Image: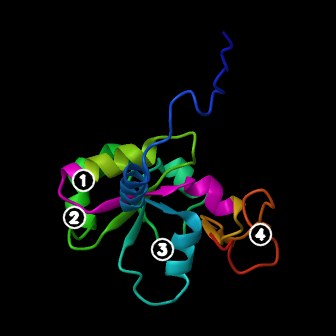
Amino acid sequence: MTTTAVNPVLRIAPATPAEAAAYFRASLVFHADVSDVAAALSTGGDPGFVVLDSRATESWDQGHVPGAVHLPNALIPEQAGELLDKSVPVVTYCWGPGCNGATRAALALAELGFQVKEMLGGFEYWVREGFEFETWQGRERRAADPLTAPIGAEDCGC
């Protein structure tokens, strides 16, 4: 009797196409990426959402998305109602993929009745993709990292 080993990728069978479509559609309901947020903000008009930085003041001072609202996680319960409009969706971010601060901010806001999405990649990928950011000294921009953004192209084509 010969047995064929199943590789680690297929050890658990993929979802059906319908299940996969439902999962990925739901993921997009909860997440936005930095390129999409930057594109929406670059039009100059009202993007239809507000960007919220949930990091501490020291982190905010190191750099943040231009136009973002600063509201550290610890202050969301007491200040969100004063700083944000529940009729306007909120896109949260924190440091980056290794940080769950944006997820915690999104949860806190959702529990307060706000529509919310989390910006995948956070501030780290905002900077790595070459988008302008603000510090207490003014605006800055770094060259795009070729591992996260195409060099010399308007967008990644995703």
Where is residue 40 shown, x and y percent of the image? 50, 79
Determine whether the residue tagged by mark 3 lies in a helix, strand or loop.
Answer: loop
Amino acid carrying mark 2 in the image: Glu
Q: Which residue is mark 4?
A: 150
Q: Which residues are magenta?
A: 110-127
- How far apart are the alpha carbons under marks 3 and 2? 17 Å
State which mark lies toward you, 2 or 4. 4
The residue beneath circle 3 is: 67
Q: Which mark is residue 110?
A: 1
Kindly identify the amino acid type of the residue bearing the numbered disc 1. Answer: Ala
The answer to whether residue 137 shows anywhere in this view is: yes
N-terminal-most mark, 4 or 1: 1
Question: Which kind of residue does numbered mark 4 sit on?
Answer: Pro
Left or right of 75, for residue 6: right
**Residues at badges 4 and 1 in contact (C-beta under 8 Å)?**
no
Query: CB atoms at circles 3 and 2 under 8 Å apart?
Result: no
Q: Is residue 155 left or right of residue 61?
A: right
The disc label shown at residue 82, or none? 2
Counting residues from the start of the chain, the first of labels 3 and 2 encountered is 3
25, above or below 49, in the image? above
Q: Nearer the viewer, residue 61 or 45?
A: 45
